[in-house]
Amino acid sequence: MRIQGTVNPDWEQIKSEMSLIEPLPLYREKQVFFLGVALGAICVVLSAGCTQVEHRHGEQASNLYLTSDTRHPIPLTPPAGKEHRAVMLQHLETIQVIMNALVEEDYELARGITETHLGFFMHRQAMENQQPENFPPAYHDLAMAHHAAAEELARIIPTKDLKQILPQFNKVLIACVACHLEFKIRETR
C-alpha cells in the first residue's frame, strides 16, 4: 500500500486507518462462524478433560442397554407366548390407566383397576390361561411380589395421600422391571 508521497509507510497510521474500516458483511459472518466453532471446540476439550473416568482392573462398567441379553428364557408354545404377551400389554395399559386416574384424582377408579387388573385375582386368571408348569419358580416368586405390591397399592389408594401412594406405586413398577430384567419368552414349537 502506498500513501501519498511516502515511500516507507507509517505502519501505525495504516493500522489506525484500517481499524476504522467496517468489515464486509460476508467477512463478519465468517468471523462469527469461526468464533462459534472455536468456542464449541474449546467446550468439548474442556468437558472431556474434566470428565472423570475410572476403570478398575478386571471390572467392566455395567450398562443394561449395551450388554448382551442374559435373561432366562421361558419356553412357551406360540399360543401361550401370545397369551403371555397379551397379559403383559394389559399390565402396561393398566399402569397407565392407574396413573391417569391418580392424576385426575379419581382414587376409586385407581383402586378398583389396581385390584382387578394387577392383584392376585389377575394372577390366578392369567395362570389358568397359560402353562404355569413352563414358568420357573423364580418367575412365580417375582409375579407374586408384583401382585402383592399391587394389593398393597390398592389398600393405600383410598388414603388419597400421594406421599403414601406414589412410593407404593413405585414398588409395583420395581416389581415389573425386576421380572422383565430376569426373564424373556422363548417360543417353542
Image: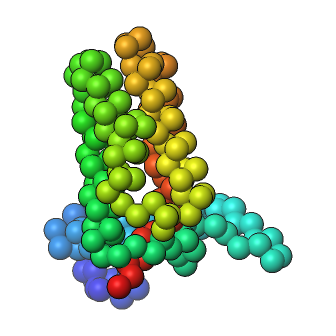
Q: Position of residue 32 (x, y in %)?
A: 30, 65
Q: Quadrant of the N terminus?
A: bottom left
Give 1 or 26, whichever is nearer the viewer: 26
Q: Is residue 93 left or right of residue 67?
A: left
Residue at figure coordinates x 49%, y 64% from the top left: 133
Residue lying at the far top of the rendered structure: 159
Give 59 or 27, whichever is nearer the viewer: 59
* Residue 17 visible in the displayed image: no
Q: Position of residue 35 (x, y in %)?
A: 38, 67
Tally of numbered discs: 0
Give 68 or 19, whichever is nearer the viewer: 68
Give the vertical position of 147 relative to 67 (above or below): above
What is the quadrant of residue 158 in the picture?
A: top left
Q: Position of residue 145 (x, y in %)?
A: 54, 42
Q: Position of residue 12 (x, y in %)?
A: 43, 69
Residue lying at the far left of the rendered structure: 25
Residue lying at the far right of the rendered structure: 57
Residue at figure coordinates x 17%, y 73% from the top left: 26
Give the vertical position of 136 relative to 3 (above or below): above
Q: Is residue 151 left or right of residue 18?
A: right
Q: Is residue 124 left or right of residue 89?
A: right
Q: Is residue 163 left or right of residue 103?
A: right
Give 12 or 29, whichever is nearer the viewer: 29
Residue at figure coordinates x 24%, y 23% from the top left: 109
* Residue 106 visible in the displayed image: yes
What is the quadrant of residue 15 in the picture?
A: bottom left
Coloration of the structure image: rainbow
Residue at figure coordinates x 32%, y 57% from the top left: 129
Q: Quadrant of the C terminus?
A: bottom left
